[in-house]
Amino acid sequence: MIPGLDRSDMQTPLKRVQGLGSAKSGTQHFIVQRITAVALVPLVIWAVFLALVLVHADYAHARALLHHPFAAVWLVAFLIAALWHAQLGLQVVIEDYVHTRWLEAASQLAVKFVCVIAALAGVVAVARIALA
Amino acid sequence: MPQVARPLSPHIQVYRWPLSMALSIVHRATGVVLALGTLLIVWFLLALANGPESYASVRALCASWFGMIVLFGWSWALAFHLANGVRHLFWDAGKGYSIQQAKTSGVVVVVLSLILTGLIWGCVILSGTGAQGGSA
C-alpha cells in the first residue's frame, strides 16, 4: 500500500483491481501464475535434460552433477517456481471444486504448507549436495 | 451449501465433448499430477543428499515396473502441460482466439506432447544401449 493514499471513493477502478479491491489481492494471483509459467518453460526443459543424464548416473556421478553451482542454482530456481506455480494452480482447483467451507480452508492451508515445506526441503537437499 | 436442492442448468453431461473442453480439463488434471510429481523430485533430491543407500533404493524403485509406469505417465503429463501451457500464454497475449485457431492449436498440442514424450523415452532407450552402462 502506498503511504498517505486516501482509500476512499477516490480510488480509480484500476487502483482497485491492482490490489485494493474486495479480495485485497486483485490480479496478483493471475500475474504470478503467468510469471512462474514463463520461468518454468526454460527451467523445466533443463530439468528434463538433467533427468535424462541422471538415468544412467551412479551415486558419485549424480552428486558431481548437482555439485556444480550452475546446476544447484538452476535446480533451486526450478523447485521454487514449480512449487509456487503448483500452489497457485491447486488453489484454484480447490476453490472450484471444494464447496464445504471448513474443508476448503483446510485444503488450502495444507497445500500451502506442503508446498512451502517441499520447497525448503528441496533447497536444503540441493545445498547439502552443492556444498558438500 | 444450499438448503434446498435447486435445479442446476445441465452442463458437462449434456454436451458432446469438443477438443478444447477435453484439453482444458486435462490441463488441470496434468497440473495436479505434476504438483505431486514435484514432491517426488524433492524426495529424490533428499535421497541423493542422504547417501548412497537411499539413492540406490530410489533408483531401484524407479527401475521397477511400477516406477516405469509412473515415470512414463509423468513424462507425458509434463509434455502436455508444457505445450498446452504455452498455448495458454498465447491466449493471455490475446492471440489465437478464433474457433478454428483454438482447434488447430489443440491438435498441435496433443501431437507435440506425444512427440516430446517419444523423444524423452527415445533418449532413455538409446542412451541405455550406448557407451555408459546403466548401474541401477
Image (cartoon, coloured by chain):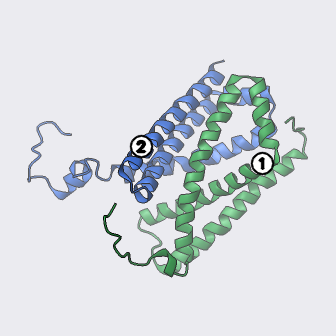
Chain colours: A blue, B green
Q: Nearer the viewer, mark 2 or mark 1?
A: 2
**Can you give x and y, in whole percent of width and height, for residue A23 in the image?**
26, 50
Q: Chain of mark 1?
A: B
- Above or below residue A70? Residue A43 is below
Q: Residue at x 52, y 74 (%)?
A: B102
Question: Which type of secondary structure does the marked residue at label 1 adopt?
Answer: helix
- Above or below residue B58? Residue B2 is below
Q: Amino acid at mark 1?
A: Phe
Q: Which quadrant does the N terminus of chain A fall into?
A: top left
Q: Chain of mark 2?
A: A
Q: Real-space Cα distance between discs 2 and 1?
A: 31 Å
Q: Image quadrant of residue B51?
A: top right
Residue beneath disc 2 = A106
Q: Residue at x 78, y 32 (%)?
A: B57
Q: Amino acid at mark 2?
A: Ala
| Label 1 neighbour load within 10 Å: few <14, some 14-19, many 20+ | few
- Please state which of residues A79 and B9 is positioned toward the viewer in this rendering: B9
Q: Residue at x 88, y 38 (%)?
A: B132
Q: Which quadrant does the C terminus of chain A fall into?
A: top right
Question: Which type of secondary structure does the marked residue at label 2 adopt?
Answer: helix
Q: Residue at x 39, y 78 (%)?
A: B9
Residue beneath disc 1 = B66
Residue at far front of view: B4
